[in-house]
Amino acid sequence: MEYYRGGIVSGFFLSSGIYKSPDRTQERIIETVKLLRTRYNYGGYIHTKILPGVSPQLIEEAIPFSNRISINLEAPGENYLSRISGDKNFARLISILREIARRKGSNFTITTQFVVGASGENDLVLLNLAERLYADFGLSRVYYSGFSPQPSTPLSGLSPCPRSRVRRLYQADFLVRGYNFKAEELAPSGLLPDVDPKLNWAESHPEKFPVEINEASYDELIRVPGIGPIIARRIIRVRREGRLTSLYELKKMRARVEKTLDFITLNGRYYGRKCRSLTPPN
């Protein structure tokens, strides 16, 4: 509260290891957030962790005081989870997540997290499950935490997860969540290559390109490297007034034109790899 009143923080994340039992620990977490909201009149952001194995009524109690609720699935299935945990049950975790999602309204969001690289999972398995969680459970985010082995633990002999793998998973997850990509489009072989997944998909599908900026649909535009949903909507809005005629117009919209050139035509003209001039017209 001292930090909050001083403007140093605007919110916090509350979690815990298991003390005595999941229910008892969850009760103490809920007691804490209740005190902050009711006794201290804390109005900032609270992300409350739901522990594995808790009773449904405790989920119900946590929701009114939280802006975000999360429970970590840790792995993309029971066969993977059993390799990294002897006491967690994937079906039980999914059932808790379903309970949270069933109560979802406008007052809180839901997230989960996977540990990457400890259970032998590949990227396609992770992204397929993330895609289902977004569609069926209304999750706002899936987080990916790279595994790091610790000495004198059962998994100490495993290799750490490369940071580049986690970075590519976040990029691909973003495309699944906001660009209407399917997981199998991005990682058909199971693992994401260590390149920009959107650019890799575009270069792997020359039959889809180039698209004409003045005619392409929203779904076609957001698959062009260098163009995202905000830029695609700007293009469509400007097209209502007339045609785009220069690369400089795209640049002014903040499109990453250096990435788009190989995949578009503009007013019928293909610029391609040899044209990189963004000089404003006279």
Image (cartoon, rainbow, N blue to C red):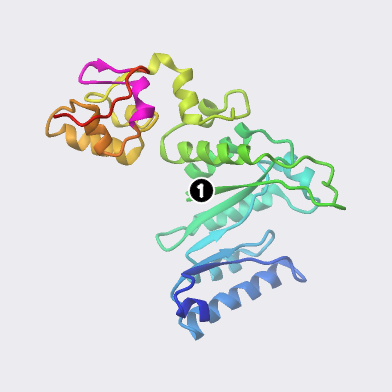
At 34% across and 39% down in the image, what residue appears? 229
Judge left or right: residue 257 versus residue 185: left
* Viewer-side residue, 86 vs 280: 280
Are there few (<14), some (14-19), or many (20+) residues within 10 Å of tag 1?
many
Residue 1 in view in this figure? no
Number of numbered discs overlaid on the protein picture = 1
Q: Position of residue 36 (x, y in %)?
A: 52, 79
* Residue at the image position 27 percent from the left and 35 percent from the top: 251
> Mark 1 falls on what kind of element?
helix
Drawn side of residue 268 relative to residue 18, left or right:
left
- Position of residue 187 measured from the top left corner of the image (x, y, whole percent): 57, 27
**Measuring 40% from the left and 60% from the top, which residue is drawn there?**
106
Placement of 265 over or under 12, stated as above or below: above
Q: Quadrant of the C terminus?
A: top left
Q: Quadrant of residue 116?
A: top right
Span of residues in magenta = 257-271
Where is residue 143? Give x, y as percent: 57, 48
Towards the viewer: 282 or 189: 282
Tell which of 262 and 27 is nearer to you: 262
* Residue 98 x/y as whole percent: 56, 52
Amino acid residing under circle 1: Phe
Asked whether residue 270 is drawn in magenta, I would say: yes
Residue underneath mark 1? 137
Q: Is residue 271 left or right of residue 195?
A: left
